[in-house]
Image (cartoon, rainbow, N blue to C red):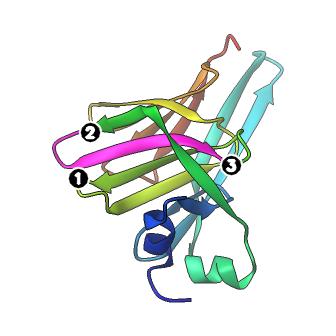
Amino acid sequence: MNANIVNDLWKNAQKQLPRVDCIVFPDDRVILLDFAIYYDPNIKASYAEVRPLCDSTMQSFLNYETPLVSVDAWRDACCTDENYRYVGGDGAYGNEGFLACEDLEGNLVWAMFFTKTNPVAGIEIKDNRLIATTEHGGAYLEINLNDITKIKYIIDKNI
């Protein structure tokens, strides 16, 4: 495989990402994420923790035949600011979600894949945070755009 595997996968008509909770970059760096959802019976509510687990590379994933998944951007799951275009949508299995940041020419800056969120249906930027709502409502992602490894997955206590 050549260098810039991520760029090649992103520029294809059918974009692909590793089918694990992760952040990928166009220089083939990958940050694996520990994404856990817990239920607290004392308060009868679920909560989530999302944090970086370790660094890797796309080549390392491919060495171990880590599956890739096709992702589809949803028309209403996009937002543009003065420098970037943010897109979201689903993975090929339908229960996953993804987010990506591209420059205004369509070059990938970073992409995230989540196995537990359901598809991303809406995106907005508030106070330098990306807010991504999920398809079924009741939960959303909040990503600090100053440090994209600071990710929150907030679950509405009423669901």
Q: The N terminus lies in which quarter of the figure? A: bottom right
Say which residue label 1 marks. 104
Determine the CA span between mark 3 and mark 2.
Answer: 25 Å
Placement of the C terminus among the 4 image quadrants: top right
Q: Is residue 117 above or below residue 34?
A: above
The three-letter amino acid code for the residue at tag 1 is: Leu
Considering every residue shown, the one lying at the far bottom of the view is: 2
Dot in front, 3 or 2: 3
Between discs 2 and 1, the one toward the N terminus? 2
Residue at 46% across, 87% down? 3
Q: Which mark is residue 80?
A: 2
The residue carrying mark 3 is: 92
* Principal secondary structure, stretch drawn in magenta: strand
In this view, 110 is above or below 135: below
Give me the residue at 50% from left, 78% from top.
5
Asked if disc 1 and disc 3 are in contact, CB closer than 8 Å, the reply is: no
Neighbourhood count class around disc 2 (C-alpha, 10 Å): few under 14, some 14–19, many 20 upward = some
How many angstroms separate mark 1 from mark 3 (CA)?
A: 26 Å
Name the image quarter holding residue 107. bottom left
Tell me which segment is drawn in magenta: 81-91
**Rendering coords of residue 19 (x, y %):** 68, 59
Image location (x, y in percent) of residue 69: 66, 58
